[in-house]
Amino acid sequence: MILDRIALFLLIVGGINWGSLGLFRFDIVAWIFGGQAALVSRIIYALVGLAALWCISLLFRDRNAAIDTTEE
């Protein structure tokens, strides 16, 4: 599903950003978009949070059912 891939991509971006914060005290998103309070940065932070909520559903999906529907 395309929404799953978008959510996973956003989580990867968020994970890299958190990793850079933890290791180097450097916020990549804020650096690119003009600070943590910048509107675009806040939108990206919100999208990463929504993606994390969406990915919770991945934990509870029946993987076999998803495979069966794509093979038909």
Image: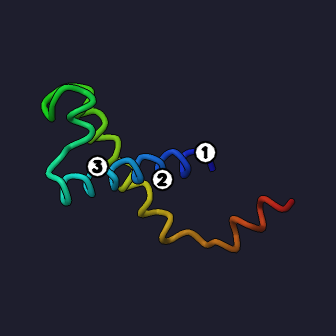
**Quadrant location of the C terminus?**
bottom right
- Badge 1 marks a residue whose secondary structure is helix
Q: Which residue is mark 3?
A: 17
Q: CA distance from mark 3 to mark 2?
A: 14 Å
Residue at the image position 21 percent from the left and 35 percent from the top: 30
**Residue underneath mark 1:** 2
Left or right, 43 with respect to 59, comes to left
Query: Viewed as shown, does residue 18 lie left or right of 55?
Result: left
Image depth: mark 3 or mark 2 in front: 3
Question: What amino acid is labelled 2 in the image?
Answer: Leu
Which tag, 1 or 3, sits closer to the chain's start? 1
Residue 1: percent from left, percent from top = 63, 50
At label 2, counting other C-alpha atoms closer than 10 Å, the crowd grade (few under 14, some 14-19, many 20 or more) is some
Disc 1 crowd rating (10 Å Cα; few below 14, some 14-19, many 20+) is few
Q: Amino acid at mark 1?
A: Ile
Q: Helix or strand or loop: what does disc 3 sit on?
A: helix
| Residue appearing at x 41%, y 53% in the figure | 12
Task: Describe residue 57's horizontal placement relative to residue 20 as left or right.
Answer: right
Question: Disc 1 versus disc 3: distance between alpha carbons?
Answer: 23 Å
- Disc 2: which residue: 8
Q: Earlier in the sequence, mark 2 or mark 1?
A: 1
At 64% from the left and 71% from the top, the residue drawn is: 63
